[in-house]
Amino acid sequence: MGRRRCAVVVLATIMAAMMELASFTVATSRRSMLNNGLGMTPPMGWNSWNHFGCNIDEKMIRETADALVSTGLSKLGYEYVNIDDCWAEISRDDKGNLVPKNSTFPSGIKALADYVHGKGLKLGIYSDAGYFTCSKKMPGSLGHEEQDAKTFASWGIDYLKYDNCNNDGSKPVVRYPIMTRALMKAGRPIFFSLCEWGDMHPAEWGAPVGNSWRTTNDISDNWESMISRADQNEVYAEYARPGGWNDPDMLEVGNGGMTKDEYIVHFSLWAISKAPLLLGCDIRNMTKETLDIITNKEVIAVNQDPYGFQAKKVRMEGDQEIWAATLSGYRIAVVLLNRGPVRYSATARWDDIGLDPKTVVEARDLWEHNTLRTQFVGNLTVTLGPHSCKLYVLKPVA
């Protein structure tokens, strides 16, 4: 009898949590129920993890903020300076507050936020919906959601990446909304990035809970990892919307593990997929090649298009793929991709991308920065080298 009563209580608890989540999902519009006014286009900025891991300190964060300004990246929209894991002491203080690590952030996070804000930028921070973060080198926020949200707000934090490690075994749909409510009551708009790794299909429930949600496991700086993250993310394209974005993880451009062509594919797919454009390299020491890729204004404009429609694969033939997304101004962005190891041709067909076959279009090559002299009817064919792509914006002219 006792075992059955226990099962009923557990079931009732789960049902109550699911009903609470359901109450979060009332809206049918393309807006996020967070109502924090953030993320109307995908966020842009930088995150410390991909290049630095736990080797971070306040000097490096300040220098990164300086570099975002001095390189001109901030003027292109790269505004978030996001501190990832390992910024706090392993223990909270006697009042239960998170404490910045004295050896690496001796000035505290508020002083750092003030510095970053003084540059016209925004500061992001990291926590976890568990007892410890993924590094196990600092506490998570499970059970301290309201306290931590108030702390972040008091420091002037603008963005929270919220991971999923070392939790109590309860479902993310139970734990993440608790932080959502805490942030809504904290008195400061904070972009809420759910880093749930796609385990429970967060695209299907993330819109009322956060401003973005990870659809994949962590990315690595190689072709196979990058292209597989793009594939996994594409499945959820219809869930992307202003205020809530699918997140296939941060950019690896400039970290050295891929070729120039592969990094161009990386940046093109993230842009057309309306993914957050969060740089993951050391922007204090970039090559001209890296800078040229991440400062391509025309490609960034595809990512930041106000319509917010994420690209879908409209045709796959072996290693050749066509990705397309509707843009504002009656335009269509198209990526023609060669995933294979040998040179090959790829064709974008009008009937695949939503155009009448008789439509005459003008094609703008966003990586060559030129409008092709030839106008196209019915299709567009290009020859592509291995692991490379073309990104066009097509505009009907007749």
Image: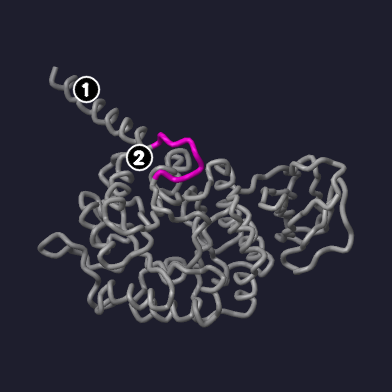
Between 10 and 147, the one lying in front of the other is 147
Q: Residues within 10 Å of mark 2 (few under 14, many from 20)?
A: some
The numbered dot on residue 200 is none
Residue 108 in which image quadrant = bottom left
Q: Residue furthest top?
A: 1
* Residues at marks 1 and 2, CA–CA distance in whole angstroms: 20 Å
- Above or below: residue 275 compared with residue 63: above
Q: Is residue 142 magenta?
A: no
Residue 30, magenta (yes or no): yes
Q: Is residue 153 above or below residue 163?
A: below
Q: Quadrant of residue 3?
A: top left
Query: Who's the residue at 53% across and 68% down the image?
Result: 77
Element class at badge 2: helix
Q: Residue at x 36, y 58 (%)?
A: 190
Say whether disc 1 or disc 2 marks the residue closer to the N-terminus: 1
Bounds of the magenta segment? 25-33
Name the residue tied to disc 1: 8
Residue 40 vertical position relative to residue 357 in the rendered view, above or below: below
Looking at the rendered image, the quarter that the N terminus falls into is top left
Q: Position of residue 206 (x, y in %)?
A: 43, 43
Labelled disc at residue 173? 2
**Residue 387, percent across and down?**
70, 60
Type of amino acid under label 2: Val
